[in-house]
Amino acid sequence: MVKHGARIAVVLLAACAGSPRSGQSGVPSLRQPTSAPVVQAPVVTPAPAGLGPEILLPQASDQDDEVARVGDLVLRRSHAYTRLLSAHPKLALTAVDLLVFDVLVARHAEQFGIRVDPARVEALAAAEEKQVREQVQAELGGEMPFAGYIWRLFGLHEQDWQQTLRLRTAQRLYQGYVIRYLALREDRVRVRFLVHKDEAVAREVADKVEHGADFGTLALRHSEDPSKRDGGLLPAFGQGFQHPVAATAFTLQKGKVSAPFRGRWGDEERWFVVYCLERMPGREVPFAAVLDEIDRDLELNPIAPLETTAYTLRWRTALEPNPPAPKPAIAVPDAAPTGNR
């Protein structure tokens, strides 16, 4: 299992949650790979004993291991985190949030008997590795061997990088499986929304949609939220979703638009309009019965950042004795436009 503090580059490699798909790779700029440190402690990535949910958890045997050495000065993981916290506090806290997220996913995977298929992990990781190799070859040609590129970029030997890639693929599968399976078990709604400072604009949009206009087109034209580029589309969500439009969304039937209403948009008040695309009743089914369905869904619609944020907010606060009121999550992830209104 990968040691969390081995190198900052490994943290960055592991930072993207969501289901892996062949055709997606995390290859940064190939023409200017990061130089490896002049003095570097050996980085060893032990192969995981299995692919159970425990791969998402820190190892019980983890110590404050050495990560680099300069002369006789030993640098340890705690030093790296302390330095990161002072230089890039948001990045450091994001790493903590990722650990919390993984612990929640591991607990739900154990609770519902969710397991990843090693053959699928291998197929996805091999496809991603193939794409990385092809990209390196296309952009660098014979300028640098693949193993040299991996070392200069990540500070990992090629075999260690391959193990890291497969471990991360399995972890991302668990994340996707848990989020989508829990969502499938509860009533959900899928909507488009618009936000605007001017009540008159919001009322004009609602009126036009009532008379047959396309909501997505109007959101693209008038909404002040970044989701406008996708016609105001949100991922399907359940009752616990923290968003200004969530409560109103569950009052609508498919094909209906809400009257304009006021809500918080960041630190300000704005007018919102919501259009219901679909109502989806929850299903009490075992994970194995819907595994193929979830795999297809993840292939077409990878986990969006808003889904991971909503999942963490809901379940993290559910475990706290006196949870603080969470701030509404209004950031909207990238989502492919659909033909629906």
Image (spheres, rainbow, N blue to C red):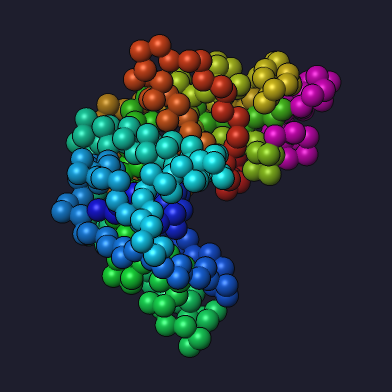
Which quadrant would residue 70 be assigned to in this image?
bottom left
Query: In the image, residue 43 lies at what x, y percent?
Result: 31, 63
Q: Is residue 47 visible?
A: yes
Indicate whether 147 appears above or below 303: below
Residue at image location 54% in from the left, 79% down from the top: 139
- In the rendered image, residue 223 lying in the magenta stretch gets the answer yes
Q: Position of 58 compared to 260: left or right?
A: left
Q: Position of 95 compared to 200: left or right?
A: left
Image quarter (top left, top right, bottom left or bottom right) of the C terminus: top right
Residue projecting furthest to the bottom:
142
Magenta span dominant secondary structure: helix
Q: Is residue 252 visible?
A: no
Query: In the image, residue 291 lies at what x, y percent?
Result: 27, 44
Query: In the image, residue 211 lies at what x, y percent?
Result: 74, 26
Magenta-highlighted residues: 196-225
| In the foreground, 63 or 232 | 63
Which quadrant would residue 156 be assigned to in this image?
bottom left
